[in-house]
Image (tube, rainbow, N blue to C red):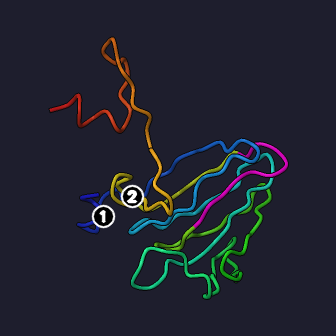
Amino acid sequence: EADLKAGSGMLYAEKIMISRKDQLSPMHYHLVKAEDIINRGGGTLVIELYHKEEGGEGLDTARDVTVMCDGMARTVQAGGRIALAPGESVTLLPTQYHAFWGEGGDVLIGEVSTVNDDDTDNIFREPIGRFAEIDEDTAPTHLLVSDYANYLA
């Protein structure tokens, strides 16, 4: 995040995800992060889109949403859905609410994005627990991102 504020260094990140068939990634938006979501293979990746309401945190149910799909502008009504076949991508900008899931099978999803801090940049419409609480009886072998604050001084 320091690189992003400085405007230099590593300003992007990449991750890979698997969305099981019909597994929902809940409705959320980002304050800072812009992201390219790519269907790398499997079923169809469906993305539901809204803008964040101006001056609030809710869904703007009136304003159309325009996103870039493989470099081409695509506009849907608020709450509209786009479907990405394997090899297709969408660019999502900050404050664009989005939820996504796989249809017709599991989907391998690639994401290339602006760096962000998951603790402060992910704004979910409904509060959710990000990481399960674990009652450890031994020291961890590998730390999760959420473990660093507890195990590293």
In the foreground, 133 or 139: 133
Q: Are marks 1 and 2 in contact (CB under 8 Å)?
A: yes
Give neighbour class at mark 2: few <14, some 14-19, many 20+ (Cα, 10 Å).
Answer: many
- Give the mark nearest the N terminus, 1 or 2: 1
Q: Toward the viewer: 76 or 116?
A: 76
Decide if residue 57 is on the left or right side of residue 5: right
Looking at this view, name the residue that lies furthest to the top.
138
Name the quadrant containing residue 132: top left
Q: Is residue 26 above or below residue 90?
A: above
**Residue found at x 59% / y 69%:** 91
Lateral position of residue 52 relative to residue 109, left or right: left
Residue 148 - label: none
Q: Which amino acid does label 2 sit on?
A: Val
At horizontal 23% and vertical 37% (from top left) the residue drawn is: 149
Q: In this view, does 69 lie above or below 128?
A: below
What's the CA distance linking mark 1 and mark 2? 7 Å
Residue 83 left/right relative to 28: right
**Residue at far left of view:** 153
Where is residue 101 shown, x and y percent of the image?
70, 53
Please provide the residue range marked out in magenta: 98-107
Q: Look at the numbered disc 1 and give the secondary structure of its residue.
A: helix
Secondary structure under the numbered disc 2 in the rendered image: loop
The picture quadrant where one finds residue 72 is: bottom right
Checking the image for residue 115, the label placed there is 2
Q: Residue 4 carries which label?
A: 1
Taking the magenta stretch, the answer to whether it contains residue 100 is yes
90 shown above or below 148 = below
**Principal secondary structure, stretch drawn in magenta:** strand
